[in-house]
Amino acid sequence: MEVVKEACSETGFFQVVNHGVPTPLIDRAFQVSTHFFDLPADEKLRYSSGSDAPLAPGYNRQPVHPPYRSEFLLMFSPSSAMTNIYPANPPHLREVEEEVFTSLSKTASLIEGIINDCLGLPSGLLKEFNSDRSSDFLMAHQYFAATEGQTNGLTPHEDSNSITLVFQDDAGGLEVFRNGEWIPATPEPGAIVVNVGDIIQVLSNNKFKSATHRVVRPGGKSRYSYAFFYSLPPEKWVEPLSQLTEEVGELPKYRKFQFGEYLELKRKGIFNPPKRPQDIIHVTHYSIN
Ligand SMILES: O=C(O)CCC(=O)C(=O)O
Ligand SMILES: [Fe+2]
């Protein structure tokens, strides 16, 4: 518990094992995503939604980034009203991804509970704050091998949701910013990287940190990863919890905002990076000075 508390307050990033997602399932997840991403481009494009929404289910290439950088397959909860697009090839892809989704949901809920207790909150409070799981989503990524002078996979960012779980293959490349340095999250077979997001930073009134992280593409081969976003519905309002502000005599460090409004501002930063770093929106946009 102390270790998690320290990790959450210093970087917002840690790796877990014995997390409940079976290693053979993780292996199968990589097998189906690799199989799919290896298909010819025109076949993959058949599973694209055709929508220009930034988070559309199905096959996506980041719209404004060079196409050789990364591509991904996105799905929402199998039980939500969102219509997922499942590639027909490999045939068991849907079954595997749904199992991964269900398993990661359980692990995220468990980790949410641990974070809740590390913050000293009444048991189950974070779960109660948001038990609507309809906006969670899973992304299977392929990042193409680095080319000369082009190693960027994902530029430094914080995740806007509450908790992200990542598993990456042995190519590595995921890094977290800590004390002015980029620290690689060393790939461990079967391990899951836990990434605290902006919502936990706000709810905790900065007690826990939303991790600044990036992906560096390795040379020589593609990198595969899965990221599961434990999120909130866009209409949800967010502000520092009273248990961590007025009840302990601290002033809130953020003003109240609606999650969807923040996503809109932020997506411009992720999918269309502004030229100047100071124009990228962070959750500190809502800071009270
Ligand atoms: O691919 C990864 O390892 C991490 C992905 C990530 O940070 C993101 O999608 O926000
Ligand atoms: Fe991220």
Image (cartoon, rainbow, N blue to C red):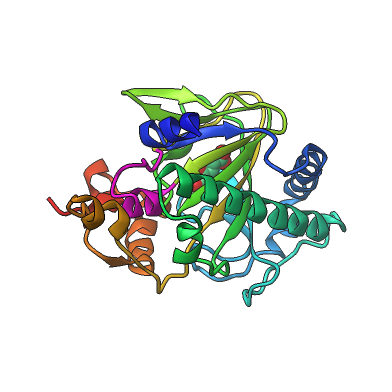
Above or below for 129 versus 7? below
- Magenta part mainly helix, strand or loop? loop
Which residue extends farthest right?
A: 91
Toward the viewer: 207 or 12? Answer: 207
Above or below for 29 versus 52? above
Q: Which residues are magenta?
A: 197-211
Q: Is residue 191 visible?
A: yes
Which residue extends farthest bottom?
A: 81
Rendering coords of residue 274 (x, y %):
30, 49
Q: Residue drawn 44% across and 31% down? A: 7
Asked whether 209 falls inside the magenta stretch, the response is yes
The image shows a total of numbered marks equal to 0
Above or below for 282 versus 7? below
Horizontally, residue 159 falls left or right of residue 30, namely left
Q: Is residue 152 visible?
A: no
Rendering coords of residue 278 (x, y %):
22, 44
**Occupied quadrant, residue 95:** bottom right
Rendering coords of residue 247 (x, y %):
25, 56
